[in-house]
Image (cartoon, rainbow, N blue to C red):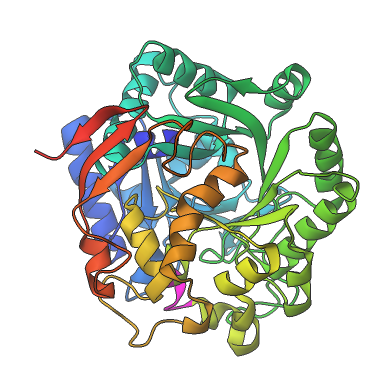
Amino acid sequence: MYNLGLSLQQVQLYGTKSYKEVLNRVITFQKEKNSEYIIGRGWDQNDWEDKKYPTKKELDSLFPSIPVALTRIDGHAMIVNSAALELAGITPETKMDGGEVLLENGLPTGLLIDTPMTLVRKTFPKQTTDYKINALKEAEKKCLKLGLTTINDAGLDREIIELIDILQQSNDLSIKVYAMVSNSEENLDYYLNNGFVKTDKLNVRSVKIYADGALGSRGAAMKQEYSDQHQHFGAMITNEAEMKKLAIRISKAGYQMNTHAMGDSANVSVLRVYAEVLKNEKDPRWKVEHSQIVSEHDFDYFSNKILPSIQPTHATSDMYWAEDRVGSERIKGAYAYKTLLNKSGMIALGTDFPIEKVNPMHTFYSAVARKDLQNYPEGGFRIEEALTREETLKGMTIWAAYSNFEENEKGSIEAGKFADFTILDTDIMTCKEDKIPNTKVIATFINGEIVYKKR
């Protein structure tokens, strides 16, 4: 939610069809804002006719002295200009585990993958408290309008968690938040040593870890080389040995571990660590976030202890190019939602915004129809992995609540639970399939109070 709020105050690059369109949006933004540091997010070279990564050449020409940092839609790649590289101290010699500074003729192209992006982010202008509050409020407004009552925020620092708590307590934020703590020493020292934080609106009892990058930027860690890039395997952001140390520490504190895993190599590393650390735990409910590409024999690791947390619109966003990345065999273990459900007994469904759109009706439609909003492809993308409407509804409500240890207070409408519910203008359980994405929210209720009403 916080990243959504931040993105609403930066250059919006979602849906751009070329690098030229990206540049035009940046120019328009700067004319309006006159920013000392231009920050944006949302471009995806897979949607462009020329699918090559952009370089800093055009940004340097347009903005020779103002730093510019434009993050890819998945948050795992960034194009920056020379001013931003210089400010961050990035040179051809910069090397970081779990990422890459792309070079051409021995010089940085301006394209950064994963970990080197942190050097740039450290140079961003300091955000005021008012800026952060406005980001959270803007994000909440969008979420409530689309019927959301609880958000799982996948990676927050203590400062933002405490700000959310203050705003909720003063009734300046209505939406409920299941906060995953970002993996930093400062955050872990505080939360793992002080136990859970639980109010009617805030639940802090989990840690977000990144095993690898994303498939779209070829950062997902694969067992074999990428089908469309020779001798390239992606990269682990957190290697297996380090992950195990973290897992043991998190488990001892009684916290839940939620790990981003895209590639088949990253997934098996996470699953091996989970299986080893949780063997004597009774009800840990640890999550593998995305569980995107899993080798056939690795699906057996999933159980009621190890739950898949997936985002169905990834399948319908990635289907145009995913097989090019991984080939015809590995794609059989990709976006395998029905298989994951059968192995674990339940599945938590979300959107992964701001990478994908916020609208949960798109999530529902992608899970059931396995099609994009233009009803492509006919028959659905790998339709054998589609979920039924009932499975999808449970994945977005009661199973999601269970994955947050909240099934006794939310996730279904019954006596004794919070009156968190959404009224829709269409019955998504019985309507024609292609009507699902256009379903609108009439009203959103939290704790029995109306927090959004369609005018």
Tally of marks? 0
Nearest the viewer among 213 and 410 is 410
Q: Residue at x 74, y 50 (%)?
A: 97
Quadrant of the image occupied by residue 429: bottom left
Residue 167 in picture, x, y percent from top left: 40, 16
| Residue 9 visible in image | no
Q: Residue at x 41, y 21 (%)?
A: 127
Q: Would residue 87 appear left or right of 134 to someone viewing this image?
A: right
Residue 281 in picture, x, y percent from top left: 85, 44
Q: Is residue 435 above or below residue 124?
A: below
User: Is 417 inside the magenta-drawn segment?
Assistant: no
Q: Is residue 268 above or below residue 412?
A: below
Residue 306 in picture, x, y percent from top left: 73, 55
Nearest the viewer among 225 and 243 is 243
User: Is 318 inside the magenta-drawn segment?
Assistant: yes
Q: Residue at x 34, y 40 (%)?
A: 421
| Residue 43 visible in image | yes
Residue 71 in picture, x, y percent from top left: 44, 48
Quadrant of the image occupied by residue 432: bottom left
Residues in magenta, as a range: 316-321
**Outermost residue, front direction?**
415
Q: Would residue 298 appear left or right of 370 to someone viewing this image?
A: right
**Outermost residue, left direction?**
455
Quarter of the image for the N terminus: give it: top left
Nearest the viewer among 421 and 78 is 421
Quarter of the image for the C terminus: give it: top left
Q: Would residue 153 appear left or right of 302 to someone viewing this image?
A: left
